[in-house]
Amino acid sequence: MATEPWQSGGFGLYLHWPFCQAKCPYCDFNSHVQAEIDQSRWKRAYVAEIARVASETPGRVLRSVFFGGGTPSLMEPDLVHAILDAVRAHWTLANDVEITLEANPTSVEAGRFRGYRDAGVNRLSLGVQALNADDLKRLGRLHSVTEARAALDLARDTFDRISFDLIYARQDQTLDDWRAELTQALTYAADHLSLYQLTIEPGTAFGDRFSRGRLGGLPTEDLSGDMYFATQELCEAAGLPAYEISNHAKPGAESRHNLIYWRGGDYAGIGPGAHGRLTLNGTRLATDTPKGPLDWLRQVETTGNGESLRQSLPLKDQAAEYLMMGLRLRDGVDLAILSALGGINKNKIKWLEDIGMVETTPHSLRTTAAGRPVLNAILTELLPD
Amino acid sequence: MTDLKNIRNFSIVAHIDHGKSTLADRLIQMTGTVAERDMQEQLLDSMDIERERGITIKANTVRIEYPAKDGETYVLNLIDTPGHVDFAYEVSRSMQAVEGSLLVVDATQGVEAQTLANVYQAIDADHEIVPVLNKIDLPAADVDRVAEQIEDVIGIDATDAVQISAKTGVGIPDVLEAIVTRLPAPKGDRDAPLKAMLVDSYYDAYLGVVVIIRVIDGVIKKGDRIKMMGTGGTYPVDRLGVFRPKMQDIAELGPGEIGFLTASIKQVRDTRVGDTITHEKKGTDKALPGFKPAQPVVFCGLFPVDSAEFEDLRDSIEKLALNDASFSYEMETSAALGFGFRCGFLGLLHLEVIRDRIEREYDIDLITTAPSVIYHVHMKDGTMVELHNPADMPDLTYVDHIEEPRIKATILVPDEYLGDVLKLCQDRRGIQQDLTYAGSRAMVVYDLPLNEVVFDFYDRLKSVTKGYASFDYQMIGYAQDYLVKMQVLVNDEPVDALSTMVHRDRAEARGRAMCEKLKELIPRHMFKIPIQAAIGGRVIARETLSAMRKDVTAKCYGGDATRKKKLLEKQKAGKKKMRQFGKVEIPQQAFINALKMDD
Ligand SMILES: Nc1nc2c(ncn2[C@@H]2O[C@H](COP(=O)(O)OP(=O)(O)OP(=O)(O)O)[C@@H](O)[C@H]2O)c(=O)[nH]1
Ligand SMILES: C[S@@+](CC[C@H](N)C(=O)[O-])C[C@H]1O[C@@H](n2cnc3c(N)ncnc32)[C@H](O)[C@@H]1O
Ligand code: SF4
Ligand SMILES: [Mg+2]
């Protein structure tokens, strides 16, 4: 069989855990606050879904497993263990398989780190978000700076690889504030950092306040541009250059899981509201599952299949997704793949090159340093009509 | 047919929002013309746009019957008129059809500019005027002060002014009595040949053209063959009736009566407002003097945002023009905007109303270009060109001089804002004609160039006087001045749709203001964009729109692909609402908003 486009990205598994201790005001992830969670019931459902999806993808080698949320660090280590056992039973794992779990840095959750490692997790991604008490509070976070530092120290001792997340371009944050905070963060960083500019999402508490004009102190476009460039400069100097819009790593320490997304690979999505992209019998499919935790659970229990959507993606959509995801990477997209998907618009590329937004090599198309922060504008030019 | 002595015809006139339509409601209601359950506020304002904006645009006629204290029953024909200056023409022609006016004055506001304008028109039309002080239910009403104003400013006796609340109904019986006792009955000769005035006409999808008439002499019956003396058209009368306010058929209309007829007339354009209607045979040979048709004074281009919608736009404009003789159009091509129409309007509100209707009723997104007035360009060879569109400005080497239309503006303003008003008029090249006081209010009369007023003068006036000034104007003629065509270049390319005529002395300031405005209105692009104003190739103002700094989604992982793709598609679709000039996209509202001056 000829190689299919997804293969240059590889194959991964995303597992969604939909619960959190509290809902953060900026967050629009599929996360819910629920007092009682019957983890053994969830275990049965995840395990059943793993078996079902694996039966559709026989012989595939898993490059990555990712526990995302929500707050996966609220899962009992036992549950994580059972899930990973099922994964190992059904798929072949790559030698260097990456198994990541997203964790919140409260002390309770840190107590479970060792259990996750013993279950097979080898990479931890910590949601630190900010390094000062006031901002943590405004972001609705339940942890303190001290707890975050302790969790980081413990994580570093426990896992092969760690990363942490910060949110910047916050309310009332100045350029100098952020430079100082990032400089400090870089002293705690291992070899990977995710640095996201705060996005005001509709349907969140912040979104609501914003639309009523009650969310002040957000940066102007110019300030947010300055912050972005300062971030590039400081991370580069610290040996953690950006390999994607918001992700920085020592060369070789990139998140393999996320690279699957950005390189147009295949991924199975299991759990409430988990999307997937699978190429089966030569057709690229988009899959989805019910968003409501109980809806998903009941559907798995009663029908033995957690999917709520399965549709083939037209080439045009595949090309659009490939551009949207791939141009986020410093290395850009593979022109051969883009051409196979019918996604090349020579005139537009030429014009974007002329104005210094993109550059091409014989094999790739990528954004320039100037183009990357305005990627949406580039994409509205390049996406197929 | 009603006896002449039992008929009263009158118009209700007032400054905008002083309560004409609400008074009409009460008159209709108290005379039982409309069943209680069918009553609604401003019943006569039936167009969507009238109801939405709470203003009257079209004059409306209603026939009501009133059993008076003297024991006789009277037929009253009332005409509710619009207050906005753009539609002053509706008021003047309505007045031609009646013998008296109810002059409504809001007792909380007092005499305003349109109050005055209406009074002068009523006096010209030889009307008996009954002053009505409205809104006395409001605590701010000051009946004595306003009565005094009416006497001082207008010079008519206000001792017998009727005090009412059109809202609560207080005083309405007094209005009805005043109509009967103080307004004259119409005159006319039943036995003379038919002579009727064509007051107005409109297009109805079911009935075709409906003609509103006022019979002066003679009698008109269903089935009669009639002749329009001005246009020469002859028609059989299909239907004859009166408005109550629904159409009600009637066998005949005699002298002094107001009603409607239909006669298989295809287009409103086949009728001429002010024309004389008579019988085809044995008609009168004495035509009424007629009135001057309403002339468009403001012109702008209307272009579809999506050039594929040009034919739809043509269709909608033709349909709207069928029903609005004061709106003119002709095809226009713009280098920047492609095919569209150059349209003429009575004023900016009229423009907005038509534009709204095209966008809403026909679902076409429009680009409206800078409004312009008609310039008289006198060529060296002695000919004169009427310039409706700055883009068509002839080569200057052949031009001798340019004239522009001027108006006489009357502004009433409380003393404390007078300074701001004078400054505004001065800034707009006004020449003061008169300044008088009535109590704590000043009445200023200015001679102003129409092009300085047409666009945002009224908005500016309202804002510098916190809404306390009122304004009315009349065209007075043309005068020569030092006028030049100013071009705007975006990213070094001239955008013809942004060209305007300006006075040379104001060009720098205007150019600067326009460049600054455009800098706000055009979204940032991936590259920086110079925006310049120029006169004949010489740049007089310049701004630079800096390049976009940041527009990227912070997070985008597997689960986000579908949603983010939708957002980008939306962003892409949003670009379709803009017009591409070279590599620059200009939003559709920018063409008109670029002209709005902040001071
Ligand atoms: N309190 C009070 N409000 C009134 C009275 N008469 C009219 N209004 C209000 O004044 C506003 C304007 O009334 P309209 O009857 O639409 O005024 P108009 O003179 O017909 O306005 P145009 O046709 O736009 O010139 C409306 O909100 C009415 O409800 C009144 O006697 N008392
Ligand atoms: C799935 S989320 C949450 C993971 C974990 N529950 C936590 O809160 O730490 C992953 C990351 O997305 C980032 N994030 C979430 N919402 C965001 C927003 N509105 N703007 C910017 N970053 C956001 C945060 O940095 C967060 O750590
Ligand atoms: S940011 Fe993390 S902890 Fe907060 S609600 Fe979202 S998923 Fe839950
Ligand atoms: Mg009205």
Image: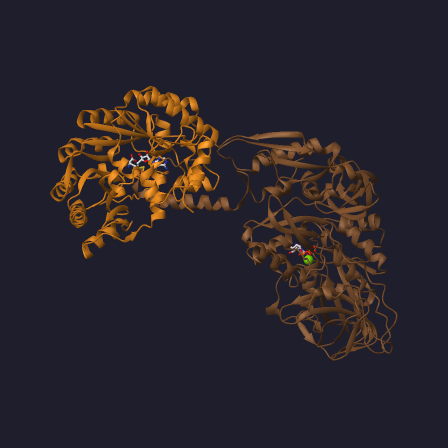
Q: Nearer the viewer, residue A207 or B505?
A: B505
Residue B400 is at least partly visible in this image? yes
| Front position in the image: A138 or A375 | A375
Q: What's the colour of chain B in the image?
A: brown
Specify whether residue B439 is in view.
no
Q: Quadrant of residue B186?
A: bottom right
Ligand 3's quadrant: top left
Q: Position of residue A357 (x, y in %)?
A: 43, 32
- x and y percent of residue B552 in the render? 41, 35
Residue A362 horizontal/vertical position (percent):
34, 32
Nearest to the observer: residue B97 or residue A262? A262
Front in this rendered view, residue B105 or B204 = B204
- Outermost residue to the front: A362
Quadrant occupied by the C terminus of chain B: top right
Q: Is residue B97 above or below residue B488?
A: below
Instruction: Establish if B287 lies above or below B136.
Output: below
Compared with B393, A247 (above or below) is above
- The colour applied to the residues of chain A in this rendering is orange
| In this view, B173 is above or below B459 | below
* Image colouring: by chain
Quarter in which the N terminus of chain B is drawn: bottom right
- The residue at 28%/53% (across/down) is A309
Counting every numbered tag in the picture gives 0
Q: Position of residue A341 (x, y in %)?
A: 33, 44
Left/right of residue B412 with respect to residue A65 in the rendered view = right
Residue A68 lies in quadrant: top left
Say left or right for B303 vs A343: right
Q: Residue at x 57, y 34 (%)?
A: B491
